[in-house]
Amino acid sequence: MLLRSDNVAGVSPEILAAVSRVAEGDMAPYGEDPVTAELQARFAELFEHDCIVLPVSSGIAANALGLSLLAGPGEAVICHRSSHIAGSEAGSVELFSNGARLVAFDGPDGRLQADTVEQFLSQTDFARAAVMPPRALALTEVTELGTVYSPNAVHELTSVVRRFGLRTHTDGARFANALATIGCRPSDLTWRVGVDVLSFGATKNGAMFADAVVIFDKSLAPTLARRQRRSGQAMSKMRFLSAQLLAYLEDDLWLRNARQANDTARRLAGGLAQLPGFDLRHPVEANLIFVRIDVAIVKQLAAEGIVFRARDAMRPKDSEFRLVTSFATSEAEIERLLGACRMASRHASTKAAE
Amino acid sequence: MLLRSDNVAGVSPEILAAVSRVAEGDMAPYGEDPVTAELQARFAELFEHDCIVLPVSSGIAANALGLSLLAGPGEAVICHRSSHIAGSEAGSVELFSNGARLVAFDGPDGRLQADTVEQFLSQTDFARAAVMPPRALALTEVTELGTVYSPNAVHELTSVVRRFGLRTHTDGARFANALATIGCRPSDLTWRVGVDVLSFGATKNGAMFADAVVIFDKSLAPTLARRQRRSGQAMSKMRFLSAQLLAYLEDDLWLRNARQANDTARRLAGGLAQLPGFDLRHPVEANLIFVRIDVAIVKQLAAEGIVFRARDAMRPKDSEFRLVTSFATSEAEIERLLGACRMASRHASTKAAE
Amino acid sequence: MLLRSDNVAGVSPEILAAVSRVAEGDMAPYGEDPVTAELQARFAELFEHDCIVLPVSSGIAANALGLSLLAGPGEAVICHRSSHIAGSEAGSVELFSNGARLVAFDGPDGRLQADTVEQFLSQTDFARAAVMPPRALALTEVTELGTVYSPNAVHELTSVVRRFGLRTHTDGARFANALATIGCRPSDLTWRVGVDVLSFGATKNGAMFADAVVIFDKSLAPTLARRQRRSGQAMSKMRFLSAQLLAYLEDDLWLRNARQANDTARRLAGGLAQLPGFDLRHPVEANLIFVRIDVAIVKQLAAEGIVFRARDAMRPKDSEFRLVTSFATSEAEIERLLGACRMASRHASTKAAE
Amino acid sequence: MLLRSDNVAGVSPEILAAVSRVAEGDMAPYGEDPVTAELQARFAELFEHDCIVLPVSSGIAANALGLSLLAGPGEAVICHRSSHIAGSEAGSVELFSNGARLVAFDGPDGRLQADTVEQFLSQTDFARAAVMPPRALALTEVTELGTVYSPNAVHELTSVVRRFGLRTHTDGARFANALATIGCRPSDLTWRVGVDVLSFGATKNGAMFADAVVIFDKSLAPTLARRQRRSGQAMSKMRFLSAQLLAYLEDDLWLRNARQANDTARRLAGGLAQLPGFDLRHPVEANLIFVRIDVAIVKQLAAEGIVFRARDAMRPKDSEFRLVTSFATSEAEIERLLGACRMASRHASTKAAE
């Protein structure tokens, strides 16, 4: 499948080199090593704020561990119905939190709206014992539908939930892609606009395996080390994750990688938008494209060996598809693909005209 | 507060008498007693089907224990957003099931619609590891908004979910009220239309404290005794609950009680519907009435000491109210109340005309 | 089975009468009623200390709910290996606490020893993230082996654990029997000697279905109402439980009942101790007797229809038995039983001599 | 700290090279890649048995995920009191299993004895609802006290538990060290002697971050993929873990590394055993040494900058220490250390003689 996901790519050479550089010699385990200490300093600088960085093994682990700091058993998390935690993590939030509840809402193009959240929060008396009190708002940046929350949009949402005592978590599996689109500083999308905990993704954007939980609200720290260990995320040779994350930030590698993914996606989306029989379903604001394609064109492309991932695995005959570019996607690839689509579109309309 | 809830009433004399009759002498504990054995036989006869009856201490315990048989950790339960399990049980389903997820949908007048459920189930490939598979549909009979699912409506919903491998649970906290409205046999609202587990409520309708889990699908039995005990529901002197439930069924006490509640509700709703300034919000199909009342009337009633429970505790100044009748509500009470409302309505419109 | 358990008895007439007295009329639900308010005052007086009383449906519910206030996920509870929570509650502590761990120790005659607990607590650095920190000590009064902790013994244990930051819970399913043996005030076995939460049992000693969680440390209160509801223990017509507990205390009914059980047990144990072929296994300090009986005598008794409950259900042919007296056990019964045992003992030794 | 742990070492060059070889190009995510496919085949060959290999991020994750296949909520796991799951994983088994219970027993030198387990299992009727049924036996190979279970010892234990319906999990964080000591084939320590699930450790013995769950009983497979994802262990670029594990096995690297660790430990232990003031606490059968050292010697060594890790972090002034060698420990290091110990021992005894 072409452009199946951004997690099919390999690793940036700079990151591989960084791992090699820390390969030898004794270092204290479980994150007490100097590489991880440097990582803490680097993130504090990057985010212009004191914070705790916890490298973890996957984006799911980052989300579930991070949210478990905000909501426990008998407490609720507000999220978008399309969010990764609601649809693709097999219940990891419920597991790590020992039974918190996700309360999911709809919203256009994968984005929660402040009105929806405010209405829900103001409608119920959460002080009553009968009611499961919401403790966290979960955002996704870039959303699962390829759109981006602006700093203002984030701030509007966090302002609402703070009035009701909730904290905010952002699933930043594609945080770099969002930053690259918006062009703001990391702080402008996080603590400055009310985000308390961030899942900082690197794996999809050039690392081998290294995501991280970034905690801006240090009052959440005391239970952290225990949760990290209990959830199997206290990696003994943590230096190998920390080294990846340091290299990821070095010389803006992460932003360069993200821009490459975003640029190729924009170019592809722009091209497809011109073609008869192709219909973009959501604004393309980062590196995800959702497109409906006429069935005749789908068949024509398949005949040439070009198959996309169905938007929905359940409906493989459906004509909606999800295309994802990555740091490893080249302009040449995009041009070739656009060429093939153009041909298939023309071919299909000729056939239809016959 | 007038007509605050049906759980403010006392106990039917027949039920109290039945408890007294089993008060003396040794009996085997934990439901191995002859009273509980008789209860099993009585329910099998009542429902015209082999079943297991488990007396429990509350409706919440019945729902949470019953649903825990259908969905476990990492599995989901489909329910209406207004359902008691979603809004009033403080996370009991999550607790008893060790972390199942509630997936809530809207639907008019508190009823789930088959289309909504079918769309959700057919949209996603629940065989994928990424997805939390739904295992149960949770219905409520009478719904939290006072409406009733007809046998056909239940059957339509259970037929959809069975195709996807789900089982069905009905929260029958007001099961007698639904039966009294519909006028069908207990089986017509349960196993004949695809319900596998029923929370059978008696407390709101005349018992002291006695609800029950009724299991029609005996393949669910093996883990039952353990779950009963683990959840603190293995009462040692079970005879005292079983005796209540037997008396509840004797000579149709349960249906007589329910009819009294339903009839007084209907009379009240019918009267209010005629009055200017009173606006019924949902069809009144059992013993719950939701009504919007003009603020001037609300004030006038309050001046006479008549205060209703706000529909929503969070918005006490809001003018929507929930009124619930019970087996202990008399026609005289209703007439008095209607008289006061009539006066208040007239008084308010006179004042407005000045 | 003779003297199978104290939960096979019926209900004290005074308690039944009290239930009847509150049977009629409207009262606020979920413990907001005046009967439950009176109960709060009565317990404060009884224990000479401000406290919260929460009526619950069973002793298991009392233990699990009470301990869940002290230890949560990732935290541990120290208990005796023979305790009810460790051996007979099917994992209720783990369920209600969302995964706390029981750490069980041995100790003679069912009693934990301060040394054992101190050694465990001082051996490990519970501040380390790798370690599950103990948060509670769980005692049982009367123990499962029929012995009693003296106030001094309790104090010695709670003094140890307090130094390490733990709180103490006492499973007082047979609290009245312990009090009756020791002859002290309720406060002398609870808050005065460091007990923070008490499971106050009434069901085994004359109630229908009424145990209670008594909380002396009010800093535990905030999460209580939610936990009560989440665990299915927010009974809507709470008055019917509160009335039982009030009657239980009235005119020292509880102590009179307990004395009857203890006295008959002491008499029986004293008699058996004299007989060849009967061998008491633990000190008989309340209403439980553990006795080894020669196989020949067991057979002789069985021939006369006298069968006791095996100490261990797994080893039914074993010759160790558990006998439990209750408030409903009469001296006449005990005399009859002793007579039969005397005969069987004589018969067996005669036979052996042949 | 000298010889603090085997997880302070770096990575074997062969493993780093293998990671570099798979760094480029697209591969299917989440273990659908060809490297992971090769891993499956390689493990089947290695263990001479069909099996499933699941690379995970840490040894704790391997244990918790593996055991969650064997025991769920309301079920128990038998383990040694010194085991890693009981003492060093912060409750990960409870978390991943949604509340299973660890039942811990003592046994000499960190090894469970078949008698102890048999006595526990045969003493209780686990069919009773009151009792939490044990479903798994958890062994550790090498044990936390540095001893090894022989194939016969494992078989004796698994034979006991199988009679009671339990399955067996082995925590093989140091599986290679055990194999190197025993000199048998991998199958001789696993499925041939009744082990159903193995935590296969590589991180402590030369990998960067790569442990694995190995499942020999394929009937456990169906829930596996969901649990993997739910617990944050579905790494998207799985190839980077699989490549490490393949290189680890290539040309017996794993056994060569383990032998280096074991040999240096044996040499060190042998030398220390000769010295006055040094007292080995457990047989040294792999790469862990527990040694009591006279306080005077401890001080003398400290003066020269040689500090060992206390056996117990809580008692830093205690004179028992844990020394761990690794694949990176050289003979030269051991000789230097032995020399220093010899000097300190002599110095201390001279001083004592003064």
Image (cartoon, coloured by chain):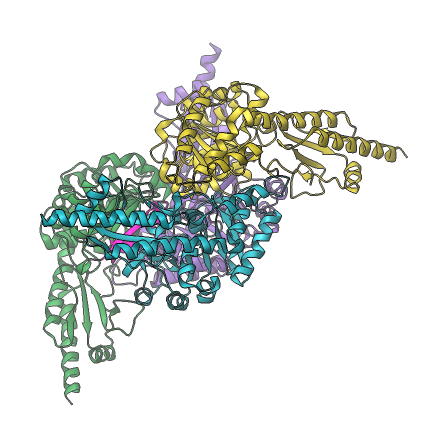
Chain colours: A yellow, B purple, C green, D cyan
Q: Residue at x 47, y 16 (%)?
A: B349
Query: How many marks are shown on the rendered structure?
Result: 0
- Report whether B165 appears left or right of C147: right
Query: Does residue A297 sit above or below D163 in this rendering?
Result: above
Residue D4, compared with residue C7, is above or below; it is: above
Q: Position of residue B17 (x, y in %)?
A: 31, 53
Looking at the picture, tell me which residue is in the foreground, A348 or C302: A348
- Looking at this view, is D290 or B190 the one in front? D290
Residue D100 drawn at (x, y percent): 38, 52
In the picture as drawn, the residue positioned furthest to the bottom comes out as C354
**Above or below, A45 relative to C159:** above
Residue C296 magenta: no
Residue C88 inside the magenta-drawn segment? yes
Q: Is residue A306 visible?
A: yes
Q: For the magenta stretch, what is the residue range?
A: C80-106
Q: Is residue C270 found left or right of B96 in the rendered image? A: left
Please report the residue visible at 66 percent of the width from the left and 28 percent of the height from the top: A265
Comparing A226 with C204, the one in front is: A226
Q: Position of residue B285 (x, y in %)?
A: 51, 39
Q: Is residue D179 depicted above or below B184 in this figure? A: below
> Would residue B287 be seen by someone viewing this image from the given angle?
no
Q: Quadrant of the N terminus of chain B?
A: top left
| Image location of residue B124, percent across then percent down | 61, 42
